[in-house]
Amino acid sequence: MRLFMTFDPRFSRPAVALTAQPVAKRTPSPANRAFQIQLTRVGKLKSQLGDMDQWAMAHRQALVDQVEPLKADHRGLMRRTVLLIDERLKGKSLSAPLKAVAAEVLCGMARTLAQQGDADMAKLHDRHATVNLAQLDARKAEALRTQLEQALGGPIDDLPPGASSDEVLAVGIARLRQQRDDEKEQRREAAERKKAKKKPSAVQTRSLVEQADASDLLRSLFRRLASALHPDRETEPEARVRKTALMGEANAAYARKDLVALMQLQQTAELTLATGGAEWAAEQLAAMTVLLKQQVADLERERAARQDALTHEFDVPEGLGVTSKTLQMVLNAQVLELEEAMALMDQDLEHLQSDAGFKRWLRQQQAVASLLKLA
C-alpha cells in the first residue's frame, strides 16, 4: 500500500489530506496496517476538536443573540421593581414587619444589580441595608480566606490589606493550582527515580529504541521541510511571504510533534517522500506509528481538557458532554428560565401598583422566606 497526499486545487492553500490507496491488490503489511490505524485515529480526533471549536463559536454567538438581550430585559425589570419598592417605602401605610420585608427584598435585588456594575443600585442598597456592600464583601473575603487556608494547610500572607472577596478567591485558586502542580511534579519525580533504579526490560528497551527512531525521523522530516521552505531563497515577495507562513506552520507542527501536519506541509511544499516515492520500509513505518500514537495520546488529553473547559464555560450538566445537541439544550433552558423569570416579574410589578396589592405581595414574599428557612 502506498501513501498519497491529496488536495483541492481550487484553494490558494491546498486542503491537504492523507489517504491510503491500494496498489495492485497487494495485502497491506502489519506495519502499514498499524500506521493506518493510528493515522485514522489522529484524523478523527482532529475532526472532533474542530467540531468542538465550531460548536463553541456558534454557541457563544447564540448567547449574544438570544440570551444577552433577555438578561438585559430581566435586569431592567428588576431595576423597575427596586425603584418601585423604594418609592413605596417612602409612604406610611406599611407596618414595621412589612417594611422590613420590603427592605430585605429591595436589598437583595439591588445587591444583585450592584454586583453587575450598577452604581445607583449600590447606593440604594446601602441606604436601606443594615450592613453595606463593602462590609458584606469584607465578611465574604474573610470567610473565603479561612476556607482556602484550611484547604492549603497554611496562611495566605501575600494579600493586600482589605483585599476584596474576588482578590482573595483569585489568589487562593492560584495557590491551590500551584500546590496541585507541585504535588504532581513530586509524584512524577518519584516515579522517575523509581524507574531509574529498575533495569529496563526487553520491552522497555525496544520502546526506547522506537522512541529514538521516531525522534530521528521527525527531525529528518522537519529539516527537509526547513531547507525547502526557507524564505531567503525566494526572490519574489509573494513567494517569500508564502514560504514564511509555511515555515511558521512547520515550526509549530514540529514543536507539538505533529507528524500529520508535517507530512501535509511536505506535500504543500511539493517535496517527494523520503523514499523517493517507493513504499516505506517497515522500520520507517514503525517509527511513524510511534509518533502517531504519541500524537493520539496528546489529542485525547486535549479533547478531554477542551470538554472540561467548555462544560464549565457553558454550564453543561455533568455527564452530558459538549455536543451541538447538549449546547442547544442548555441554550433553550437558559432562554426558558429567563422568559419565565420575566413573566413572574411582570406579575410582581402589577401587584406593586396599589397599596393593597403591594401588601399582599409582601406577605407572599414573607411566607416564601419562612418556608425557605424551614427547608
Image (cartoon, grey):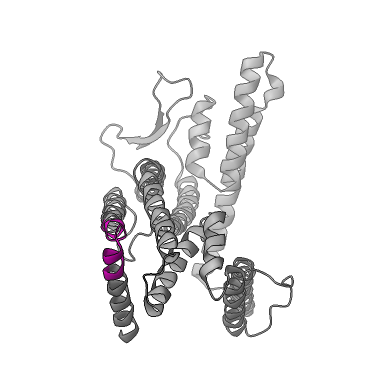
Tell whether 259 sits left or right of 61: right
Q: Residue at x 63, y 80 (%)?
A: 197
Q: Position of residue 145 (x, y in %)?
A: 62, 78
Residue 75 place in picture, x, y as percent: 41, 53
Residue that appears at 48% across and 47% down: 288
- For this view, does 219 lie left or right of residue 28? right
Q: Main secondary structure of the magenta part?
A: helix
Q: Measured along the vertical axis of the image, is residue 13 above or below residue 68?
A: above
Is residue 42 visible to us here? no
Against 25, residue 97 (above or below) is below
Residue 119 quadrant = bottom right
Q: Is residue 356 magenta?
A: yes
Classify residue 347 by image quadrant.
Answer: bottom left
Query: Depth check: 109 or 199 in front?
Result: 109
Residue 119 located left or right of residue 361: right
Res. 263 in view = yes
Image position, residue 267 (x, y; %): 49, 29
The residue under the point 32% across, 82% down is 370
Compare residues 224 and 262 and report the one nearer the observer. 262
Q: How many numbered callouts?
A: 0
- Residue 303 point in image, percent of width and height: 42, 55
Does the magenta-highlighted stretch encompass residue 78?
Answer: no
Which residue occupies the extreme top position in the image?
A: 236
Rendered-image quadrant of the N terminus: top left
Question: Which quadrant of the figure contains the C terminus?
Answer: bottom left
Q: Nearer the viewer, residue 246 or 31?
A: 246
Pick out the residue farthest to the front: 92
Please report the bounds of the magenta region as a residue range.
347-360
Instruction: Give 199 or 349, whichever is nearer the viewer.
Output: 349
